[in-house]
Structure formats: C-alpha cells, structure tokens
Amino acid sequence: MVIVYLSTIMAHMEPTKSLKSPSKGRKVERPLPIPVQRALTKLGDDINRARRRRGLTQQSLAERIGASLNTVKRLESGDPRVQLHFLARALHLFGELQRLNDLLDSGKDDVGLALMDEKLPQRVRTAKKSRNAF
C-alpha cells in the first residue's frame, strides 16, 4: 500500500534535478517542488519575453551580462542551476533590478512582521531602580 502511494506521488512530481553533494562529489537526487519549478519556468519565460521586446538576441544578452550563450538558454528555460548573479545582471540590463531588491524586504514581510508582533509583551513595565544606583 505504501509503494502504491509513493508511486502515485512520484507520478505527479516534476523530473528530479541532480545536485552534487558538497562533501563527497556524488550526485544526490532532490526533486524540486512543483510550485518552485513553475515559478522558475515563468521567470525564464519572462526573461525571454523581456529580451525579445528589447530586440536582443540570446547571444547579445549573454555578452552584456558576461555569460555564455548556453547559460542564457538555461536561464530562459528556468534551469535552477543557473547562478543568481546572471539573473541579477539580466534584471539590471532590463532596468528591473529594483524588483530583485524588493523580494523579501523586511518592511513588506507580512508573515515575519506578524510573527514579531506575536512575541511582543502584553505590557511594558518600568525598570526597578537598583540599590546601588546613584
């Protein structure tokens, strides 16, 4: 029964991406959650569209951000192994770097702010003076 359940789950998952284990150099299979894969694919599509709207070829984008043509192709396909600085350079080129800057702005982090508010004390008392105070 467990095997049937696991095979059902695996059938609904995206293909796994191989990631090298930092300690042994062996590849460890870690599936990307489907929402993450979809977000990366959409981001790649958006970069592709932004590039084409600006009349840039993949080769010219690669040259401008200091990447290889293959890296730009992987970036536009949503490959999770593309280094973050290439995304940042592309956003900078497109005039959209501020969006990356605002991703997890602490002032706009509603969940983080709510969690902080839960930890606030109910009341604040004045500190008692110690006997050795001048």
Image (cartoon, rainbow, N blue to C red):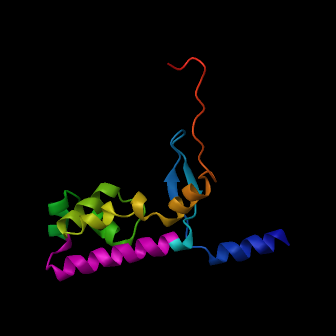
Quadrant hosting residue 33: bottom right
> In the displayed structure, does residue 8 sit left or right of residue 42?
right
Residue 98 versus residue 47 in the image, above or below: above
Q: Is residue 52 magenta?
A: yes
Q: How far from the left and from the top, in percent, is residue 70?
A: 28, 64
Location of the N terminus (image quadrant): bottom right
Residue 114 or 17: which is nearer the viewer? 114
Residue 93 or 18: which is nearer the viewer? 93
Quadrant hosting residue 81: bottom left
Q: How far from the left and from the top, in percent, is residue 79?
A: 40, 66
Q: How far from the left and from the top, in percent, is residue 76?
A: 32, 72
Q: Residue at x 40, y 60 (%)?
A: 107
Report the magenta residues as a range: 36-58
> In the displayed structure, does residue 48 sit left or right of residue 24?
left
Residue 89 or 110: which is nearer the viewer? 110
Q: Residue at x 34, y 63 (%)?
A: 102
> In the displayed structure, does residue 129 sit left or right of residue 1?
left
Residue 120 versus residue 109 in the image, above or below: above
Extreme residue in the front direction: 134
Residue 29 at least partly seen: yes
Q: Residue at x 63, y 78 (%)?
A: 12
Q: Residue at x 61, y 20 (%)?
A: 131
Q: Is residue 16 magenta?
A: no
Residue 19 versus residue 131 in the image, above or below: below
